[in-house]
Image (cartoon, rainbow, N blue to C red):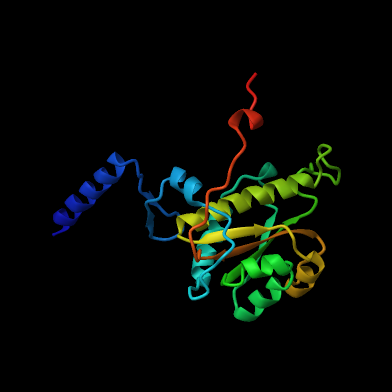
Amino acid sequence: MKNHFALIAGIAAAVMLLSGCTPRVSLWKNTTYNTSLDELFATRRSIRSYDASRTISEEEVRTLLTASQQAPSWANRQPSRYYVAITPEKVAAVRECVGERNAQNVAGAPVLIVSTFVKGQSGFGFGSQPANEIGDGWGAYDNGLANAYLILKARDMGFDTLIMGFRDSDKLRTLLNIPDSEEVLAVIALGYRAQEPGTPNHLAFDEVVKFF
């Protein structure tokens, strides 16, 4: 019986490899994901309409944010921090901090995640002086890298996201007890798309890339 299952698994893996789909085993729980990286790039979209009938568990959010911790950061300082609103009351409260239009866009999202970074870490040496003119901008950069991992992992798990930069940082700081040592960056909606989005236009390659 074991040999029979092994044969079936081998055939399945061969079919996926021949079709260009490489199976990946999750590092965080015993789950295999079959979405290729190119598929994630192609299907990830900023979603502005969510299916309010579907929920996401705390365990799933933990898996998602564990993936974000794999992102690189300045000297491995790991400045990113996340505050997860997952109860209906907290989700509603955070939604009131993102502006009327964003609030409408994410009305059906079951989870809202506030991303921050610890100031004075990325972009700084061992003293208090910044290593270059960017300063704490490197903390924002590192948080953006972690957020990129987050939204790609979300799509890998079948979820959808919207990163919102329009937010009331003071209200969020009070609501979630975010310390002054951290800079509030974005609010990220997490849920399931209610409808298929269109494909946005992108700049021509030569407009954004120069070879020398």
Q: Residue furthest top?
A: 212
The foreground one among 199 and 131 is 199
The foreground one among 180 and 169 is 169
Give the mark count. 0
Looking at the picture, does residue 65 appear above or below residue 109?
A: above
- Residue at 65% in and 32% down: 208
Judge whether residue 70 can be spotted in this image: yes
Judge whether residue 77 can be spotted in this image: no
Quadrant containing the N terminus in the rendered view: bottom left
- Residue at 59% in and 31% down: 205
The foreground one among 19 and 26 is 19
Looking at the picture, does residue 7 appear above or below residue 175?
A: above
Image location (x, y in percent) of residue 112: 62, 68
Quadrant containing the C terminus in the rendered view: top right
- Residue at 72% in and 67% down: 98
Image location (x, y in percent) of residue 61: 54, 66
Does residue 148 appear to the left or right of 164 in the view shown? Answer: left
- Residue at 68% in and 51% down: 143
Q: Residue furthest right?
A: 129
Does residue 21 appear to the left or right of 67 in the view shown? Answer: left
Q: Residue furthest bottom?
A: 89
Image location (x, y in percent) of residue 103: 67, 69
Does residue 42 appear to the left or right of 123 in the view shown? Answer: left
Does residue 85 appear to the left or right of 159 in the view shown? Answer: right
